[in-house]
Amino acid sequence: MRRLLIASIATAVVSSAVLAQEVRLPLKEGSIRFAVIGDSGTGDGHQLRVGKQLAAQRARVPFDLVLMTGDNLYGMERARDYEKKFTIPYKPLLDAGVKFYASLGNHDDTNQRLYKPFNMGGERYYTFKPDRSSVRFFALDSNYIDDKQIAWLEKELAASGSDWKVMFFHHPLYSSGGTHGSADLQREKLEPIFVKHGVNLVIAGHEHFYERVKPQKGIAYFTLGSSAKLRKGDLKRSALTEKGWDDGYGFMLMEIAGDDLYFEVLSDTAQLIDSGVVHRTGKVAPTPGRSSQPVVATKPASVP
Amino acid sequence: MAARYLFNAFVLASSCITADSLAAGPMQHATQSPAVAPQPVKKNDAPVNADAAALADFKKRVDDYVALHRRVAKRVPPLKETNNPAEITHAQAALEQALSAARATAKPGDLFTPAVRTAFRKVLIPEMKGEDGHDTKAVMKDDAPTTVPLKVNAKYPESATRPTVPAAVLMNLPKLPEEVEYRFIEKHLILLDAEAGMVIDFIPNAIK
């Protein structure tokens, strides 16, 4: 018991320590690397600068896919808007064969699902697993969570075995945002399923800032909705907040290698905003308050 | 919340019960107690209540609309996966125009009849009360557009947001086929053809 207590205190100290530590992606052989952008579709200079920085960072961190957390196209959605708000800002990445995987935000027409470069397979919600990886991604439509989507999610998660389970969608289930805050109603429906099936990582947008939330029930939560929109001062740091930034535009780079997920959050000027590593520990007994598959926690990185 | 859910579940489940299924005989119960044994239902008994009948009628009207949608969709360029976004916008506009023409005489209340509106309000209004209701309304207000015309066959404005429909509300409303969605525009509920981007019908002041 005493040893457990000491270990818990040590873990807490260590978890805090990781915040101050600069951890860069280790670029391990056979790892899965991806970028994340959110609330990106303005077509303005901020989106262009983030797009340019993303492309520049790819020279350092080769990644093959980009997750989009929604609000992919603000305003009109004519053919020229797809160009202005998507293909032009990310042209170097698209030309290099990087695949974008979109989820729908509240500013998105559901027919975006038919746009092939968004890789949604014609569906509002979908799942995919990169070749030779142990990571399965799930894009949800958090605007419209009906029985059918819930049944689909249950089925797909149940079939996903011991893979890393990464969810991405628009509304953050936990957030310290002053404008929106936590999406409680979506959380009520989704979190029990995430916990039951051992989801490891949830990435959302909607809030126009960056926030890394303390792991909740064994699940890591990131919010990134500042790839073209920004609400300065809207992050009301709370007990949820592990790290936050509402002072500029940015994106995330992530790498999953074995049981570790490494992350970097970068600004459009390549400033490192946050970095660290999330570690999956072994299986645990399922409880309502804790993920039934590997628990997620931050720990100091043993990276070069 | 639980009581509300049970009420809603009862109303919605009841809407699936037809006079024929009632006439088929008593349902099987686990208990064998003669004191609670169900009595056979007479052949011409009406559906269990007016709300259930209204919701069953609504389902039929939605099915009829979707059948029309599918017929019309065969006559216009298909909405299919493409690299060319112009094909998406062109196909969506063509579908919207063809549907609008095919139901030129449609009017408010064709799907949301007065009885259906009453039944929907009975489901929706309790969802807006209390602390949970406060959260629900906050979600619906969040980024809700104000420029969507409350008009049958109106085109949903391209630049308008698609307001989030709270999952708890959605799960208490009758289920819809893929082509059709519920959306709340302020206090009003619209039935939206999601593929065509067109207002099919609406309930003004569906919530308070």
Image: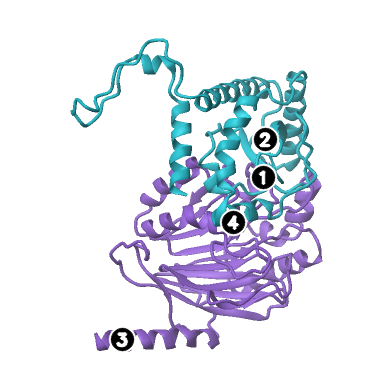
Q: Is residue B161 left or right of residue A1?
A: right
- Numbered tag placed on residue A249 in the rendering: none
C-alpha distance separating marks 3 and 2: 56 Å
Residue drawn 57% across the image and 31% down it: B119
Q: Is residue B46 left or right of residue B146?
A: left
- Residue A257 lies left or right of residue A248; in this view the side is left
| Separation of residues labelled 2 and 4 (CA atoms) | 24 Å
Residue assigned mark 3? A5
Dividing the picture into quadrants, the one containing residue B39 is top left
Inspect the image, locate mark 4, and give the three-letter code of the amino acid beneath it. Answer: Asp
Residue B208 marker: 1
Q: Is residue A152 visible?
A: no
Considering the numbered disc 1 on the image, is that residue within a helix, a strand or a loop?
Answer: loop
Q: Secondary structure at mark 3?
A: helix
How far from the left and from the top, in percent, is residue A11? Answer: 39, 84
Q: Of the residues tagged 1 and 3, which is closer to the observer?
A: 1
Name the amino acid type tagged 1: Lys
**For discs 2 and 1, the disc positioned in front in the rendered view:** 1
What is the residue that sits farthest to the front in this orientation?
B35
Q: Amino acid at mark 2?
A: Leu
Give the colour of chain B: cyan
Q: Which mark is residue B135?
A: 4
Mark 2: few/some/many CA within 10 Å (<14, 14-19, 20+): many
- The chain coloured purple is A
Q: Nearer the viewer, residue B86 or B101?
A: B101
> Which of the 4 quarters of the picture holds residue A66?
bottom right
Q: Are marks 2 and 4 on the same chain?
A: yes
